[in-house]
Image (cartoon, rainbow, N blue to C red):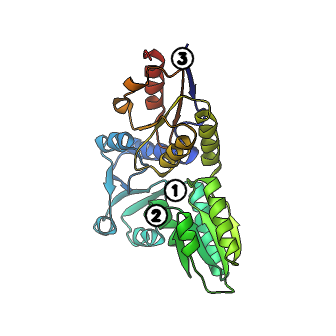
């Protein structure tokens, strides 16, 4: 009999659920509603919000041209200057849906930077969360994402350095990169800012993938945390599939699988997880 193991941590995390709920609450109030950037990295959720009249501001230029309405800051946070633009517009009402774990990193970077420490952000430089984090540094700041960049990262000798992580970064990889930096004789003050939900999700995914014949990871291909889950599962299970919805699922080649694991990124709605789970349960393998 086929066994299906679905991660208990799969689906919306606290920060994502909080952000999405804030948008729906504003829809109920009515008026012109905008999000600065997509509220989360999930096309179905963003599409549903657009159908309900929520528009996405994609740039500073879009924001600068806006004179009235409600602007909701996305869960990933935004660069510091976006708040400055918003505060200069009396016709704009601001609703901040930045994940509290991300806001905490903003505070750490600002405080440590003001103390004179250089900043290293371990994460993806092009990700909206990291772009926001970097903006809170008042001095030297660098972003690294892998061992090669850690080896090539150079600061002035004698400087103290504070290292933080993108909330969705791979925890074991963060620790490995910090160790590389320590061996370069820097005085490193590292703060593990990988959020607890991410740690739990990654640990559970690794555990399930180590038992499963096939692993299904559900989430947007633009989602950082989903990508990390896929990489972790692939390390333990060669037959790992990354899908966004049930339409992407094709396990015709895998009729012999006796144990299928399922996990999902932090921006994946529960109903998609349930659809995939029910399909796999019914499917003949």
What residue is drawn where x is 34% and y is 39%?
48
Q: Kindly indicate whether the residue at mark 2 contacts the one at mark 1 (C-beta within 8 angstroms).
A: yes
According to the image, label 1 marks what residue? 98
- Residue 252 left/right relative to 224: left
Q: Residue at x 43, y 15 (%)?
A: 284
The residue pinned by badge 2 equals 78
Q: Nearer the viewer, mark 3 or mark 2?
A: 3
Q: Is residue 133 left or right of residue 252?
A: right
Q: Quadrant of the C terminus?
A: top left
In the picture, measured across the screen, residue 184 lies left or right of residue 42, that is right
Q: Name the one closer to the observer, 284 or 128.
A: 284
Establish if 280 lies above or below 150: above
User: Distance of mark 1 from mark 2, alpha carbons?
Assistant: 8 Å
Closer-to-camera residue (14/221)? 221
Q: Position of residue 184 (x, y in %)?
A: 67, 76
- Using a 10 Å C-alpha cutoff, classify the residue at mark 1 as few (fewer than 14 neighbours), some (14 to 19) or many (20 or more): many
Q: Residue furthest top?
A: 1
Mark 3 lies on residue: 2
Q: Residue at x 54, y 20 (%)?
A: 258
The quadrant in which residue 180 appears is bottom right
Residue 207 location in percent, x, y? Answer: 64, 36
Q: Secondary structure at mark 1?
A: loop
Quote the CA–CA distance across marks 3 and 2. Answer: 45 Å
Q: Secondary structure at mark 3?
A: loop
Decide if residue 205 is on the left or right side of residue 279. right
Mark 3 / mark 2, whichever is N-terminal: 3
Cα distance in 3D space between marks 3 and 1 = 41 Å
């Amino acid at each position: 009999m086929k066994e299906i193991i679905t991660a208990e941590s799969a689906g919306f995390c606290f920060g994502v659920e909080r952000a999405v709920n804030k948008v729906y609450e504003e829809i109920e109030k009515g008026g012109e509603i905008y999000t600065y950037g997509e509220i989360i990295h999930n096309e179905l959720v963003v599409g549903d919000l657009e159908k309900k009249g929520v528009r996405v501001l994609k740039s500073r230029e879009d924001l600068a041209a806006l004179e009235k309405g409600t602007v909701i800051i996305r869960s990933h946070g935004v660069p510091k200057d976006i708040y400055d633009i918003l505060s200069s517009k009396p016709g704009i009402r601001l609703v901040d849906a930045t994940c509290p774990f991300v806001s905490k990193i903003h505070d750490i970077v600002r405080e440590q930077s003001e103390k004179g420490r250089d900043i290293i952000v371990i994460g993806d430089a092009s990700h909206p969360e990291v772009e926001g984090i970097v903006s809170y540094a008042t001095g030297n700041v660098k972003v690294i994402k892998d061992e090669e960049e850690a080896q090539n990262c150079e600061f002035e000798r004698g400087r103290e350095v504070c290292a933080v992580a993108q909330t969705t970064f791979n925890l074991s990889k963060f620790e490995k990169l910090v160790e590389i930096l320590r061996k370069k004789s820097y005085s490193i003050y590292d703060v593990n800012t990988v959020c607890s939900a991410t740690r739990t999700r990654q640990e559970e995914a690794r555990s399930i993938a180590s038992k499963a014949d096939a692993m299904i990871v559900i989430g947007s291909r633009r989602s950082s945390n989903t990508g990390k889950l896929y990489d972790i599962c692939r390390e333990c299970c060669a037959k790992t599939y990354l899908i966004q919805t049930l339409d992407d699922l094709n396990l015709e080649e895998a009729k012999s699988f006796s144990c299928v694991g399922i996990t999902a990124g932090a921006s994946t709605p529960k109903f998609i997880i349930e659809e995939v789970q029910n399909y796999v349960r019914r499917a003949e393998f």
